[in-house]
Image: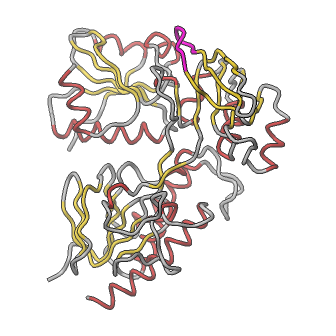
Amino acid sequence: MPVSKILLGEDSFQKYTTGNDCLVLVFKSRCPICKVLAKVLDKCMGEDSELKVAEIDSEANANLMTQLDVSKVPTMLVYKSGQLAARKTGVANAKEIMTFYQNT
Amino acid sequence: MKPDFDLIIIGGGIAGMTAAIYAARANMSVLILEKQICGGLANQTYVVENFPSYDSINGMDLMEKVKDQVEQLEVKIEEINEVLRLDLASDFKKVETDENKYTAHSVILASGRVPCPLPIENDWEEHIHYCSICDGSLYENKEVLVVGGGNSGFDESLYLASLGVKSIHIIEMMDTFFADQQTQDKVEKVANIKATSGIGIIEIKPEGKKANVIMQHATSGRIETELIDGIFVFIGQKPNTGFLDGKIDIDQQGYIMTDQDLHTNIPGVFAAGDVIVKKYRQLTTAMSDGTIAAMEACQYINSVR
């Protein structure tokens, strides 16, 4: 069973990413492609138990969206050692995501 | 020897889910394989107002209700499971996905359509959108272009205006708009939406977070530039038939050719919904296709097992 993703807010976001390697999915509840990507990330987590994945609801965190310069959902943010290392918008399959994450 | 399922349905949009309901109620074992999530293009429709039984309903809500009904009938649904290869020639049809291989007596192809991308090379992809429900709210108090003068372009512009987008310019490459007159009339009454036909984008030049969009009028050749925050694209859809790899007869545009009972050129393989050659592509016509394809498939399955 895949581990469930952590839902971050403006307060918890900084704490979660600081010093860590992780993937953060920025989504919106009414976005079908976001639901697709969330399920793909579940698949990735099922295949790699070390992978840390969290989510941010773009509508509930408007200031954070400005701070992160997000203009499209879904957006995937890759953090390496706490630094924003890469971003990717739109849908991708599990293999593409894992390659993207590992090559960042 | 028995196959894994009586029927495999490729595509979990309204056509595929309707077919599943009919087949499951005929005591067939049914598998739906969906590349993304069930619901198809209807998931991206903010409001559906022509579906009998609801005056007005959100597209994703409607599709979730249909999916609930399908699940109650014990249809196996596999989402995020893309079909890679088909072997339809033998008695048991074989379907291979990125996760597994499955066999069935019969297959219904209901893989639908996907939105056509904006055919302009650019370095501004993060600001080019195909789903206003997803990204519209990020453009409150901003200026956008909507590409496409059909029903989707006009309806989605009304939705964007309701979200507080500051200005919306609908552009259509052809010299006339294709949206129905009632929708065009609604748009005309909204002060911050304007619509221009006979104009197309030729270049997008990013300027910080905004972009200068260079457009050309088709008849006069006159060039116009507009500084905008984002582009929403609604220029139609193309059939999702690439995975068929020449095994099923398709027309020049890639739509599956069927007879009136939705048989394809291969016995035991049927097709339904937006992916087939037909004139009208609506939720209700897709449901009709799903019904017919399922009933024909059931008849076929009973004849071979």
Q: Residue at x 61, y 48 (%)?
A: B58
Give above or below for B70 relative to B243: below
- In the rendered image, which quarter contains the N terminus of chain A? top left
Q: Position of residue B269 (x, y in %)?
A: 36, 75
Give above or below for A19 relative to B83: above
Q: Position of residue B243 (x, y in %)?
A: 32, 57
| Residue at far front of view | B220
Q: Residue at x 21, y 10 (%)?
A: A81
Q: Is B190 on the left-hand or right-hand side of B21?
A: right
The overriding secondary structure of the stretch rendered in magenta is strand
Q: Which residues are magenta?
A: B204-211
In depth, the one of B221 and A73 nearer the eye is B221
Q: Is B198 on the left-hand or right-hand side of B16?
A: right
Q: Quadrant of the rendered structure where residue A102 is?
A: top left
Q: Position of residue B130 (x, y in %)?
A: 53, 36
Q: Residue at x 38, y 77 (%)?
A: B265
Q: Position of residue B182 (x, y in %)?
A: 81, 49
- In the rendered image, which quarter contains the C terminus of chain A? top left
Q: Quadrant of the rendered structure where residue A20 is?
A: top left
Give above or below for B239 relative to B184: below
